[in-house]
Amino acid sequence: MINLENVNVEFGEFKALHNINCSINAKDFILILGHNGAGKSTLLDVISGRLTPSSGKILRNNVDISLLSEAKRARFISRVFQNTNMGSVATMTVAENLAMATLKCKTAGFNFAIKNFPQQIVEETLKPLGLRLEELLNTPIGKLSGGQRQIITIIMATLCEPDILLLDEPTAALDPVSTENLLQFVHNFTKNRNMATMMITHAEQQAKFLANRTWVLQKGKLESN
Ligand SMILES: Nc1ncnc2c1ncn2[C@@H]1O[C@H](COP(=O)(O)OP(=O)(O)OP(=O)(O)O)[C@@H](O)[C@H]1O
């Protein structure tokens, strides 16, 4: 589905990614491990289009997307950051944030989206979680706990059914119990979807039950693939 061919990323003299070759298939759950500065976020940056490779190619279904903008790739590649402020708006309610996320796949405006709030998100996604998040729809998202907000952010990132979900240390700001809950949520949420997930984590032991593949980056090189 997504293939990286001989991808290099250079910042001036410094080479952050060295000749990366890998493939990401539908339904893969790939853990990305590595020390600080190993190149993990840079790898997600180059896949999401935040960075353009210095050389090499990124293919989606055999089409070269290396020069496609981040905004255009967002239709099929969704990214969630450790800082939930980057994926949701604190002062807007949970419902407004979810409605806003539906706009990514439509041409309608925000007023239309909020007036036509998709109840199916409540019935099909929120209620089955059993976390009573549907009771918080009218609460500003900034008032939720870090774990609750991260769950809503991940749901928002997947409303347009991307091919691939990129999770950049989604548990980094969470306590151990919230980390367990979030990982369990991610497991339940991703397993029945026809979507690949790549997750950067420093919580390898806790997260390894999620993954069918584990990649380790070391000084910009992909050690296991
Ligand atoms: N815009 C940039 N300009 C120069 N160097 C950069 C830039 N972005 C990243 N780097 C360098 O590239 C290397 C890889 O950074 P990256 O953020 O990908 O590491 P990481 O594995 O995600 O680390 P961490 O676990 O600390 O988040 C680091 O040495 C970093 O300093």
Image: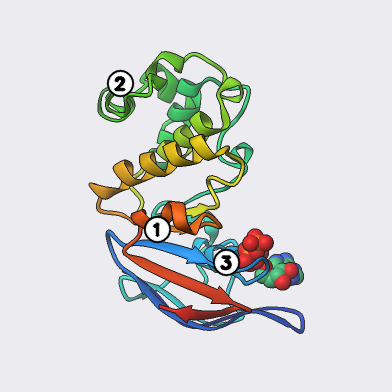
Regarding mark 3 in the picture, which secondary structure is present there? helix
CB-based contact (under 8 Å), mark 3 and mark 1:
no
Q: Is residue 48 left or right of residue 85?
A: left
User: Considering depth in this image, is 134 or 177 the residue closer to the camera?
Assistant: 177
Q: Residue furthest right?
A: 13
Q: Residue at x 57, y 66 (%)?
A: 40
Q: How far from the left and from the top, in percent, is residue 196? A: 34, 58
Q: Would the CB of label 3 be found within 8 Å of ligand 1?
A: yes
Question: Which quadrant of the render holds ligand 1?
Answer: bottom right
Q: How far from the left and from the top, in percent, is residue 116? A: 36, 20
Q: How far from the left and from the top, in percent, is residue 68? A: 50, 66
Q: Which residue is mark 3?
A: 40
Regarding mark 2 in the picture, which secondary structure is present there? helix
Q: Which residue is mark 1?
A: 208
Q: Residue at x 41, y 32 (%)?
A: 108
In the rendered image of this protein, does residue 51 appear above or below residue 162?
A: below
Q: Is residue 224 left or right of residue 212?
A: right
Q: Would the CB of label 2 be found within 8 Å of ligand 1?
A: no
Label 1: few (<14), some or many (≥20) within 10 Å?
some
Residue type at mark 2? Answer: Gln
Mark closer to the chain start, 3 or 2? 3
Mark 3 vs mark 1: in front = 1
